[in-house]
Amino acid sequence: MTNQQMNTFLSFVRKETLHIVRDTRTMAIVLVMPVILLLLFGFAISTEVNNINVAAVVPEHGEVTRDMISRLEANPYISFKGCVTQDDAGRMLQNGDVGAVVMFTSDTDPEIRLRIDASNTNTAQSAAGYLRGILAVDKAGTPTATRTLYNPQLKSAYNFVPGIMGMLFILICAMMTSVSIVREKETGTMEVLLVSPIHPLSIVLSKLVPYFILSCIVLSTILLMAYTVLGLPWSYTAVHVIWVSIIYILLSLSIGMLVSTLTSRQFVALLVSAMLFMIPVIMLSGMLFPIENMPRPLQWLSCIVPARWYIDAMRKLMIEQLPVASVTDDIVIMSLMALAIVTVAVKKFNEKLQ
C-alpha cells in the first residue's frame, strides 16, 4: 500500500470515527449500556439467596440439632424465625411469613426434611440447594463441611459478567458494523467511496477499525467494573482475558462484515443480526441456561454459536482463574470461525463488485 493509499485509508477511518462520535444516540448506547447491564445483573437482577426467612420444627433438642440451629442463626443470608410447632410452621408458610421450614425428626436419627414455598420456582430451588448445603450431614449423622469453589459467596454477577461481554461485543461489532456498511449502500455513498484509489476491501476494513477501537474501550470499561465494583477476583489471567476478548471482537467484526455483504437494507441487516446472532447468544451460549441441560440437538446447534466458546473461556479465565492452556480449544474454534467467516465475506464482497 502506497503512502497515498494509506492516507486515503486513514481518512476513511477518521470519517467513520467522526460519524460514530457525532451520533450521540449510538455513543450513549455503546458506552452507557455496558455500565447499566453490569449494574443490573450485578446487583438488581440476582439469583443469589438473600434474606430468606426460615423456621425450624425440632421435636427434641440435642447436640446435633443445636449445632444445625446455630448454623442457621449464624448464616448472614438467612433470617431465622426460631423454633416452632409443626402446625405453626404450616401456617407461617401459608401466610408467607417464612419461605422455608426445616423439620428434624429426632436428635439421635437426625433426618432432615425441608418444606419450601415454591410459588416462586427459582427462589425455591435456590433456597433448597442452599439449605441442603448448610445442613449437609453424612449417613452417620455427623455434619459434613461443604466447600464452594471459585464462587464461595454464590454471587450471580460471577455468572453474568462473561455472558454480558459475549452479548455486548456481538451487538457492537456485528450488528452496528453491518448496519453501518449497509447504510452506505442504501444512501448511495458506497459507490462514491469505491472510486477512490484504494482497494474496495480496504474501504470496508476502514469502517471496521473505529468499531474495533470502540469495542476495546467497552472491554476496558467492563473489566474495570468487574474487578472493582463487582468484586471479581483479580489475577494474572486478566492479561489472557484481554487478548482472548480481542480474538472474539475480531470474530464479531467478521460476522458484521459477512452480514453486510448479504443484505442491502439497514432494516434487513438489523433483523438478520438480531435473529441469527443476538437470540442464539442469549438462548444457546450458556449465558442464561446451562448447555448440559439442553436437548442433544440444541447442544449440537450451540456449537456454531461463537459466544458459547467465548463465554466458556471467560468463565475459566475470570472465575476459575485457570491457565490459558485450559481454553486452547475455545481459542482455536473462535480463530477458525473468524478465518472461515472472513473468507466467505471477502468472496461475497468480490462477487458483488464484479
Image (cartoon, rainbow, N blue to C red):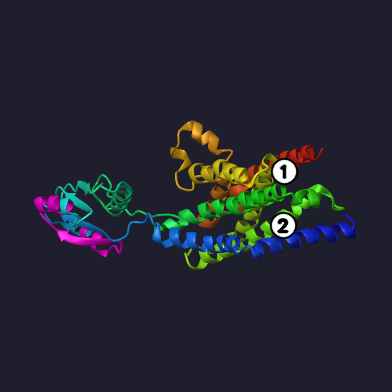
Q: Is residue 319 left or right of residue 122?
A: right
User: Residue at 78% of width from left, 37% of height from top?
Assistant: 351
Q: Using the rendered view, name the quadrant where residue 260 is placed.
A: top right
Dot 1 surroundings within 10 Å: few (below 14), some, or many (20 or more)? many
Looking at the rendering, in which quadrant would you find the N terminus? bottom right
In depth, the one of 181 and 65 nearer the eye is 181
What stretch of residues is rendered in magenta?
Answer: 69-93
Q: Is residue 54 left or right of residue 84?
A: right
| Residue 235 can be seen, yes or no | no
In depth, the one of 10 and 270 nearer the eye is 270
Q: Position of residue 77 (x, y in %)?
A: 30, 61
User: Residue at 67% of width from left, 52% of height from top?
Assistant: 180
Kind of residue at badge 1: Val
Q: Position of residue 309 (x, y in %)?
A: 57, 45
Q: Is residue 92 magenta?
A: yes
Q: Position of residue 247 (x, y in %)?
A: 66, 51
Disc 1 marks which residue?
Answer: 342
Kind of residue at badge 2: Val
